[in-house]
Image (cartoon, rainbow, N blue to C red):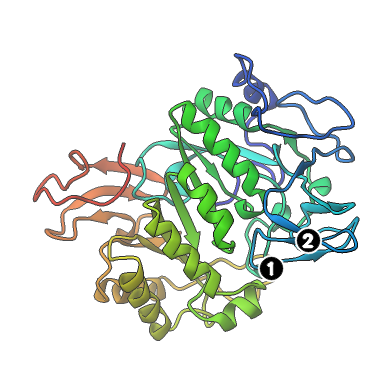
């Protein structure tokens, strides 16, 4: 998952530039029910003791003012005045609230390749945004400064959906991207921001761990154009020990995204000794081909020590190259090497003739030889969202 640009927990855009994108009467969607003890304007810094609260969309009421969250597979049962594992949903007398609808702690206009999306609008930018919180705890999280804290612990700005979409348009971005922390925990915000963005002609994308229940995923997918899922490992043991999650719901989410016709890309952060065996990579690649199809891009990305996993070295490039070769040998058409700028595994090749149709270095597109979404040499259609 890409890091936010700028200091941790801060907005990559200035308050003035955010406000500049709000001209024309931007505000909350008519369907929003936001509770404040004070009045805030879009782009205004949020007092950390006065967060907005909106009733959550996916939960059920239990006896004794308890609730059960039905957003992610953690399925937290939450007592009155308590919060779920994510730290951003709170039970108030038997009504469950999200505390991060419109609460933006990081926003920046990034190259869309940074997400990474390699088959979505190459060379264009995405207005990236995040709220605090996450529904798992990866020991290798690179954005732990925002994902592992509660919203009142992270400086944030109020940027409701329509205001966010207008700011994205003014920034020159072609898409929005819910990213940096974990969009599942601000899923209502993702939904409403995607609706607002589509009305302005922008694509909507999500960068997620895919750890979500089926109903909320299916409800929001029609509003999205592309989803990148971090597939942490192909072993449930890894999810339990390193992530505090489960593999099975993530695999189901991948199938649902693909079957819904939403563009899908997968990133595997390859961590030395933990998820880098050839057998695991081949099993993962076989599953992708059999259940999602050979045209779903898979990125094998280099690990760097961080957060609670600093005892391991960065992934050797030779290991990434082995993953790259193994996955291609299993029949996947679009396989990439990530976090190794200048590597030939960053380019997109035509599966039929081998011609380099998109040449990259890091997050920058050097050449784009696609012609109407097809190889310029052999005319083979290259899967993706190119316009």
- The answer to whether one can see residue 39 in this image is yes
Towards the viewer: 54 or 345: 54
Residues at circles 2 and 1 in contact by the CB criterion of under 8 Å: yes
The reply, left or right, for residue 274 in relation to residue 338 is right
For label 1, the SS is loop
Residue 252 coordinates in the image, percent (x, y): 48, 68
**Residue 231 visible somewhere in the drawing:** no
Earlier-in-chain disc, 2 versus 1: 1
In the displayed structure, would residue 255 be above or below residue 120? below
Of the pair 185 and 9, the residue shown nearer to us: 185
Q: In which quadrant of the rendered view does residue 307 lie?
A: bottom right
**Where 66 falls versus 372 (above or below)?**
below
Q: Is residue 201 left or right of residue 33?
A: left
Q: Is residue 96 left or right of residue 297?
A: right
Q: Nearer the viewer, residue 162 or 213?
A: 213
For image coordinates 67% across by 60% down, the residue present is: 70
**Residue occupied by mark 1:** 74
In percent of width and height, residue 62 lies at 81, 63
Where is mark 2, residue-wise? 84
Please rate how many residues cluster around mark 2, counting C-alpha atoms within 10 Å: few if below 14, some from 14 to 19, many from 20.
many
Q: Would you identify the image quadrant in which residue 325 lies?
A: bottom left
Residue plotted at (52% across, 68% down): 250
Q: Residue at x 68, y 48 (%)?
A: 57
């Amino acid at each position: 998952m890409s890091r936010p640009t700028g200091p941790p927990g801060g907005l990559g855009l200035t308050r003035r530039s955010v406000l500049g994108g709000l001209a024309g009467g931007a505000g909350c969607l008519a369907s929003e029910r936001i509770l404040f003890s004070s009045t805030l304007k879009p782009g205004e810094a949020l007092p950390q003791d006065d967060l907005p609260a909106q009733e959550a969309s996916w939960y059920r009421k239990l006896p004794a003012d308890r609730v059960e969250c039905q957003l992610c597979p953690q399925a937290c049962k939450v007592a009155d005045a308590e919060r779920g594992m994510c730290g951003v949903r709170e039970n108030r007398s038997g009504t469950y609230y999200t505390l991060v609808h419109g609460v933006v702690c990081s926003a920046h206009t990034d190259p869309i390749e940074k997400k990474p999306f390699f088959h979505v609008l190459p060379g264009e930018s995405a207005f990236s945004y995040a709220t605090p919180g996450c529904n798992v705890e990866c020991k290798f999280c690179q954005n732990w400064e925002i994902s592992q804290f509660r919203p009142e612990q992270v400086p944030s700005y109020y940027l409701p959906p329509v205001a966010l979409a207008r700011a994205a348009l003014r920034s020159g971005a072609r898409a929005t991207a819910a990213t940096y922390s974990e969009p599942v925990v601000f899923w209502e915000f993702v939904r409403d921001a995607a609706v607002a963005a589509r009305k302005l002609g922008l694509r909507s994308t999500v960068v997620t761990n895919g750890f979500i229940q089926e109903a909320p995923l299916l409800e929001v997918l029609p509003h999205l154009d592309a989803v990148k899922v971090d597939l942490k490992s192909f072993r449930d043991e890894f999810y339990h020990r390193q992530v505090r999650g489960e593999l099975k719901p993530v695999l189901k989410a991948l199938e649902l995204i693909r079957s819904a016709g939403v563009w899908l890309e997968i990133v595997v952060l390859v961590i030395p000794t933990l998820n880098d065996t050839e057998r695991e990579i081949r099993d993962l690649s076989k599953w992708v081909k059999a259940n999602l199809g050979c045209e779903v891009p898979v990125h094998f990305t280099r690990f760097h020590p961080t957060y609670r996993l600093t005892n391991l070295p960065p992934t050797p490039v030779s290991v990434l190259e082995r993953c790259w070769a193994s996955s291609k040998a299993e029949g996947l058409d679009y396989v990439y090497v990530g976090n190794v700028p200048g590597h030939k595994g960053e380019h997109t090749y035509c599966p039929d003739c081998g011609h380099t149709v998109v040449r990259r270095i890091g997050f920058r597109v050097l050449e784009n030889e696609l012609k109407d979404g097809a190889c310029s040499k052999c005319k083979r259609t290259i899967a993706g969202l190119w316009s």
